[in-house]
Image (spheres, grey):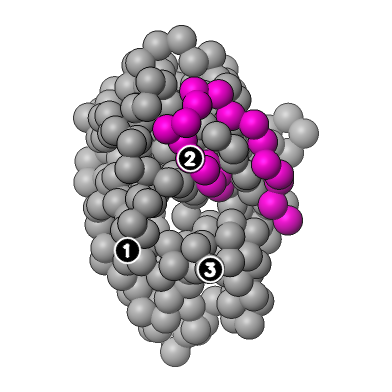
């Protein structure tokens, strides 16, 4: 079993994504900063601290993954308290999406929440997305044409209000790890046999292919095909090329020109419970 990975900063000042690739546990984490945009020691953001807190729990690799997810959620809460975050306002919460797997005895144990993804690619070239759910940013991204057409003022106010509304729906209509007890109600988890699995992909949404029209439910078939044709590094480079042609985010609605990326591709996962790194993709 071999793996390769990408951990790359987007257009922000700090990479808020983290990943784990150690022994038989692999995971990606996509941190989201509170809307008050506060930073802490060394310019660290809430999103960075949330995703790093989750990583620090999962990397212990000593309990079932769903229990580690609950521990990661608690660690985020404790870290927010340590930093004096005002938790009376939900938009102040830090959060992280997470997708984590553990490989043992030709079985895949997995847990997922938020917009981080796990895809199994089988020997017959079909694939399976372990969690298929609506994109919680769909309604927000649908407002992008109005923003581009009308510019500032009313359109921007509408978009800002929508972003705040969606943040306040954390662990009500969609899940993330953010310290709330209700985060545990949005944990997807399970086991999958690996006998027919050729490759496993884990990635944060920075690896998503930009689309002109927002999708309520993301179609990952084009992504899987590009990965099969170009490899992980080639897929990432193609996405960056598309984004570079639209620096104002006007053609392809998205929140920033380039998002952070954490991604792992594991080859022949059924063959071994330990992995050797193939390379870090550039």
Residue 278: say if magenta: yes
Of pointers 1 and 2, the one earlier in the residue sequence: 1
Mark 3 surroundings within 10 Å by alpha-carbon count, few (fewer than 14), some (14 through 19), many (20 or more): few
Pick whichever, 121 or 209, lies toward us: 121
Residue for point 44% across, 67% down: 225
The quadrant of the rendering that contains the N terminus is top right
Please tell me whether residue 251 is drawn above or below residue 92 in the rendered image. below
- Where is mark 1, residue-wise? 218
**Image marks 1 and 2: residues in contact by CB distance under 8 Å:** no
Mark 1 or 3: in front is 3
Q: Earlier in the sequence, mark 2 or mark 3?
A: 3
Q: Secondary structure at mark 1?
A: loop
Instruction: Based on the picture, tell me whether residue 96 belongs to the magenta stretch.
Output: no
Inspect this view and state whether residue 72 appears.
yes
Q: Residue at x 69, y 52 (%)?
A: 281
Please tell me whether mark 2 sits on a helix, a strand or a loop.
Answer: loop
Of the numbered discs in the image, which one, if any, rests on residue 229? 3
Q: CA distance from mark 1 to mark 2?
A: 26 Å
Whether pointer 2 and pointer 3 mark residues with C-beta atoms closer than 8 Å, the reply is: no
Residue 270 position in % (x across, y down): 42, 32
Spot the residue most to the right: 42
Mark toward the start of the polypeptide (1 vs 3)? 1
C-alpha span from label 1 to label 3? 20 Å
Q: Is residue 90 left or right of residue 181?
A: right
Disc 2/disc 3 C-alpha distance (Å): 17 Å
Q: Quadrant of residue 168?
A: top left
Instruction: Point out the frontmost of discs 2 and 3.
Output: 2
What span is colored magenta in the figure?
263-282
């Amino acid at each position: 079993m071999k793996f390769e990975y990408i951990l790359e900063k987007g257009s922000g000042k700090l990479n808020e994504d983290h990943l784990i690739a150690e022994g038989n546990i692999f995971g990606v984490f996509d941190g989201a900063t509170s809307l008050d945009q506060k930073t802490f020691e060394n310019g660290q953001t809430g999103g960075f601290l949330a995703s790093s807190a989750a990583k620090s729990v999962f990397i212990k690799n000593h309990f079932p993954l769903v229990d580690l997810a609950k521990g990661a959620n608690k660690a985020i809460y404790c870290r927010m308290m340590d930093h004096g975050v005002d938790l009376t306002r939900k938009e102040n919460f830090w959060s992280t999406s997470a997708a984590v797997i553990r490989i043992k005895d030709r079985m895949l144990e997995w847990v997922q929440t938020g917009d981080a993804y796990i895809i199994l690619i089988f020997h017959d070239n079909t694939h399976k997305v372990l969690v298929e759910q609506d994109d919680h940013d769909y309604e927000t991204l649908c407002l992008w044409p109005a923003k581009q057409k009308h510019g500032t003022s009313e359109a921007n106010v509408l978009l800002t209000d929508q972003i705040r509304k969606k943040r306040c729906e954390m662990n009500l209509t969609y899940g993330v790890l953010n310290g709330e007890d209700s985060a545990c109600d949005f944990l997807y988890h399970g086991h999958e046999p690996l006998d027919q699995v050729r490759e496993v992909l884990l990635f944060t949404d920075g690896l998503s292919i930009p689309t002109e029209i927002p999708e309520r439910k993301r179609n990952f078939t084009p992504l899987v095909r590009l990965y099969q044709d170009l490899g992980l590094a080639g897929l990432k480079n193609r996405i960056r090329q598309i984004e570079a042609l639209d620096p104002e985010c006007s053609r392809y609605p998205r929140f920033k020109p380039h998002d952070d990326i954490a991604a792992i591709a594991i080859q022949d996962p059924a063959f071994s419970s330990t992995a050797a790194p193939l390379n870090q993709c550039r």
